[in-house]
Amino acid sequence: MYNFDCPPHPSCLIESMRNVGYSMETAVADIIDNSIAASAKQVNILHDCGPHGPSLAIIDDGCGMSGSELIEAMRAGGNSGPLAERGETDMGRFGLGLKTASFSQCRRLTVISRKAGCEIAAACWDLDELDDSWALKVYSSADEVESLSVSSELSGGPGTIVFWEKMDRVLDQATDPAHVRKFFLSSIDRVSTHLSLVFHRFLESTTAGQRFSICVNRIPLKPFDPYFSRHKATQKLQEEVVSVPSRGRNVLIQPYIIPHYSKLSGPDRDRLKEMGGPSGTQGFYVYRNRRLLAWGDWFRLRRAKTEASGLARVMIDIPNSLDDLWSLDIKKSSVSPPEFVRTELGRIIEKITGCSTRTYVSRGQKLSSKRYALWRRQASNQRVNYVLDRDHPLLDSFFASLSTEEQCQFKGILDLIEDGLPVEAIYNDKLGENLALPQTTLSEEVVRNHAALVMMMRKQGIDDAKIREIIMALNISDATGVQTKEN
């Protein structure tokens, strides 16, 4: 028996590393983890789709690396694997993120870095030039490094640039340059949306010395808070703590009930829909060192997502020392809670989804039972249906202006409207977040129609104060131009 040195073939191994399942957005997020670990205060993502194809640079103002540290960082399978001791704020896990994330998107990876008191350093992996050896291209002088097009972005201070070229994953999507550019820019939009959620707690932080920003082509990203925690209608329920005695650590669980979508502002509703809508974004949100790992899932502890439970969100904070218990994957985008935590989560689900359902149903009942609402909610024999309020002043005023024969015809029309209400289609569209919400600005034609309704009600002797209340009950803004007083 003897030992045989059996290293993997470089080209085969790296080509395999390219296919671990990263999307562009999860790959960029993995690189930004390194920036945060390097105490960066700002990350700028610069992208271009010029004659030589798409390229992307991720630039931070962190502490940077020396030449020897850079070489170690570029090593496939560095010395900081999953069994290595990590500081509490360390964002890494397998020591592969820089390489696997980058190679998943490009064939040429260049990293440029400067550390205080050290010369600027750079190294490059080009998969098209990779022979059957692990020969890393290292730039040996400052002049060589500064000849690289993006090196000037370090602007004399410490920091790191991760530069992706030969982005074949984008080029493979189309042959026409215009279509390549369109796909690339669409991918960048998804990256921006993803980062605004994944790093929202960093972007929201106003603690002295902890400000952090991410810019895309120098335009700052706005964080997306999935809990709408600053909204007055958000319910922050009691925090729970699950102890892990064998590790001496705790898992923090903070449930929220977000406001009913009708209480959100237009921009908040738009962002919520962009993220998947109330139903698509319900569930657990698992964080590791404030970085969001996985979200919008009940971990199969609930049979299905429902519209009524769509307001429920559960923030879970885990320390990096429990990574192995949560089966954190290499992309840091998938987790699975250990059994002792699942038991607690199951109990919490019942409580929080019950709160969500009560809030959802209560809001729906308030909307349908509001004075002067055109539609009335009727519940009987555990079933609910919606009917028109035949005594509504608006319908009553119009009814009074009709002849006896016309009144009979109008009643028949109202019956048809009620019987033909497409409840199933409305429900499906609501689940798909496709329903249009009331507009804050109305067309001139709609304003004229509302004005005609006002005049009709006045002819029936309804006073202006009551007319205004009726108009407001129809979700018509005060800014519609409809006046309830004579000029």
Image (spheres, rainbow, N blue to C red):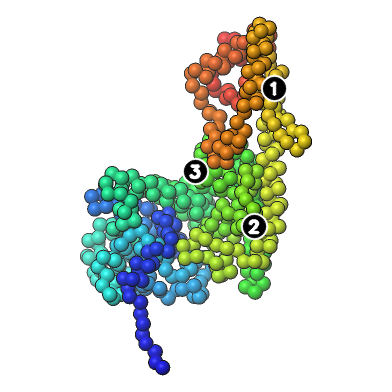
Image coordinates for residue 361, horizontal then vertical, percent: 69, 39
**Foreground label between 3 and 2:** 2
Quadrant of the frame with the C terminus: top right
Type of amino acid under label 2 = Leu
Tell me where residue 433 appears, x and y as whole percent.
54, 39
Circle 3 residue: 274
The structure residue drawn at horizontal position 71% and vertical position 34%, both measured from the top left corner, is 384
Q: Residues within 10 Å of mark 2 (few under 14, many from 20)?
A: some
Kindly identify the residue that appears in the image at 57 percent across and 17 percent down. Answer: 450
Give coordinates of residue 470: x percent, y percent: 65, 20
Give the left or right position of residue 327, taking residue 33 as reference.
right
Residue at x-position 46% and y-position 62%: 331
Secondary structure under tag 1 reads loop
Q: Label 1 amino acid?
A: Asp
Q: Earlier in the sequence, mark 1 or mark 2?
A: 2
- What secondary structure is found at the residue carrying circle 2? loop
Mark closest to the chain's N terminus, 1 or 3 = 3
Please provide percent x and percent y for residue 42.
42, 55
| Distance between mark 3 and mark 2 Cα atoms | 26 Å
The span from disc 1 to disc 3 (Cα, nearest Å) is 35 Å
Report the disc number at residue 290. Answer: none
Local SS, label 3:
helix
Query: Disc 3 residue type?
Result: Glu
> Is 292 on the left-hand or right-hand side of 62?
right
Q: Is residue 196 left or right of residue 256?
A: left
Nearer the observer, 369 or 289: 369
Q: CA distance from mark 1 to mark 2?
A: 42 Å
Read off the residue under disc 1.
389
Question: Which of disc 2 and disc 3 is earlier in sequence?
Answer: 3
Q: How many numbered marks, from 0 up? A: 3
Q: Which residue was labeled with disc 2?
A: 301
